[in-house]
Amino acid sequence: MKRRQFITFIAWRNAGCPQDLRGRHRDWVRLIAALSAMAYMLASHSALSQQPASQGKEAASEQQVFNNACRTCHTIKEGDNRQGPNLYRIMGRKAGSLPDYSYSSAMKGADFVWDEEKLAHFIASPDEVVPGNNMKPYSGLASTDDRTKVIAYLRSVSTGRP
């Protein structure tokens, strides 16, 4: 059956189709209707996300800021250290404490645990918090809003969205 004949077959049940294909028309229509319904359900917003649309946009914005400011050197995957250590579950972790990463002596000697306040200050100005760290050429993220988004993203990937 040629393409044009098939389209005609689907659109008009008895239009120029051989007798043996007319009986199958109803089956084709049901199949197409079922597949269309499944595609609609899979593509619907409620099927894709259990979060309100504003939360989804907010999370995407947080991830985008993290990607732009931090992802060159850091990942959020446990055990995946790059130029910088992974930031998986950084909240509550002692600074310079990942066993499989070679920190600077300044970071190893830092005597604090990462929390939101310490991260915000460090992201704004790493050299003020830990003088002699190896975060060069990064000198800080000036925007308070962007720092808040990075911290929210790190919190969400470590503990799940609050």
Image (spheres, rainbow, N blue to C red):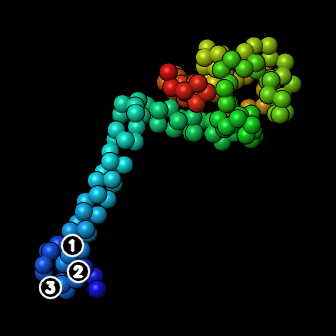
Point out the frontmost of discs 3 and 2.
Answer: 2
Identify the residue at image location x=32%, y=59%: 35
Residue 2: horizontal and vertical position, in percent? 28, 86
Q: Position of residue 144 (x, y in %)?
A: 52, 22
Q: Residues within 10 Å of mark 2 (few under 14, many from 20)?
A: few
Please name the residue shown 61% across and 27% down the image: 158
Residue drawn at x 47%, y 36% as measured from the top left: 60
Measured along the vertical axis of the image, is residue 38 above or below residue 154? Answer: below
Which quarter of the image is occupied by the N terminus?
A: bottom left
Q: Quadrant of residue 113?
A: top right
> What is the secondary structure assignment of the residue under circle 2?
helix
Question: In this figure, which residue is indicated by the disc labeled 3?
Answer: 16
- The amino acid at mark 3 is Gly
Q: Amino acid at mark 1?
A: His
Q: Which residue is mark 1?
A: 25
Q: Quadrant of residue 49?
A: top left
